[in-house]
Amino acid sequence: MADDTILDRFDTVACEAADTFVDAYYEALRHDRPSISSFYCAKGTKGSLPVPNIAWNGNTYTDAFEFQLYVEELTYLNFEVECVNCIVLDPKCVPVEQLKRGGDNPENALERGMSFTILATGKVRVQEQLKGPLRSFSESFVMVPNPDYEPKQVVIGDRQKSEEEATKWNRAWLIETQNFRFTEWGEEELPKKDEGVKMAIDSKKRKDTNGETNGMKRNAFAGFAAAGLFSKKR
């Protein structure tokens, strides 16, 4: 198979996966927050860096369940994604033979071993559905193969069902790195200069017993408090 054909196939699969992921992830943030941790790779290290590596508006997490607990405390969120870009990073991130059923027909499973990045931009409605503040955001994801994903076998008589399944997020790839940022704030929502300095100093002082930064101990709600993004109790 020609290299250009393979790369085209990788691009097509990555773009389709990005579209279904974006729909599923932001829908989960709105309606199914207890499922958020299932979108992330297993906790571990890659080289000398911990994964997953999650940054939400300056607050960092290296544990998907810890991040999920944080998200569950946020108030109403409704993301309106306006643009999605996707780029293949490493076509051979994981050898397909190491993936479930990848060795059955390696040439037809090449794209399953790739990693890719997603950039989503748009607006997010916070606090309440109709009159809540609308904020612009930018978010990037690095997606890596899920070693536990096992593709379903497609039979001719079940073609319609398989096409329907193709439009759903099947978790064949998981989030390894994530970076969320508001790109627009209301002036009245920004912390005062002295408060911002104090927040930065306090966050640097909060360390866990191993001396590493712990997202939940870094005043995790400070970055969203001004915008009304969290509630004391749900």
Image (spheres, rainbow, N blue to C red):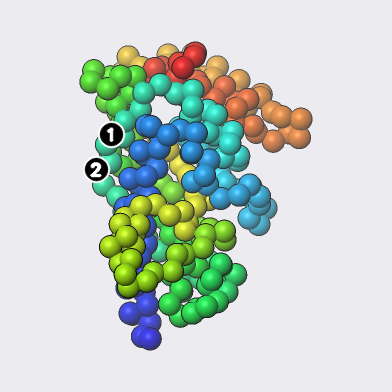
Q: Is residue 139 visible?
A: no
Is 20 rendered above or below residue 121? below
Residue that extends furthest to the bottom in the rendered view of this protein? 1
Q: Is residue 203 visible?
A: yes
Residue that extends furthest to the right in the rendered view of this protein? 209
Q: Secondary structure at mark 1?
A: strand
Q: Is residue 23 left or right of residue 222?
A: left
The residue pinned by badge 1 equals 123
- Tally the marks: 2
Image x and y of residue 154, in percent: 39, 69
Q: Residue at x 63, y 55 (%)?
A: 46
Image x and y of residue 86, in percent: 35, 57
Q: Quadrant of residue 6?
A: bottom left
Which is nearer the eye, 151 or 220? 151
User: Of label 2 and label 1, which has the lower sequence position?
Assistant: 2
Amino acid identity at mark 1: Lys
Disc 2 to disc 1: CB gap under 8 Å:
yes
Which is nearer the eye, 69 or 219? 69
Q: CA distance from mark 2 to mark 1?
A: 8 Å
Is 87 rendered above or below residue 81? below
Q: Residue at x 39, y 52 (%)?
A: 169
Is 129 rendered above or below residue 115? above
Image x and y of residue 71, in percent: 48, 29
- Within 10 Å of disc 1 (Cα), the crowding (few <14, some 14-19, many 20+) is some
Q: Quadrant of residue 139?
A: top left
Image x and y of residue 116, in percent: 43, 59
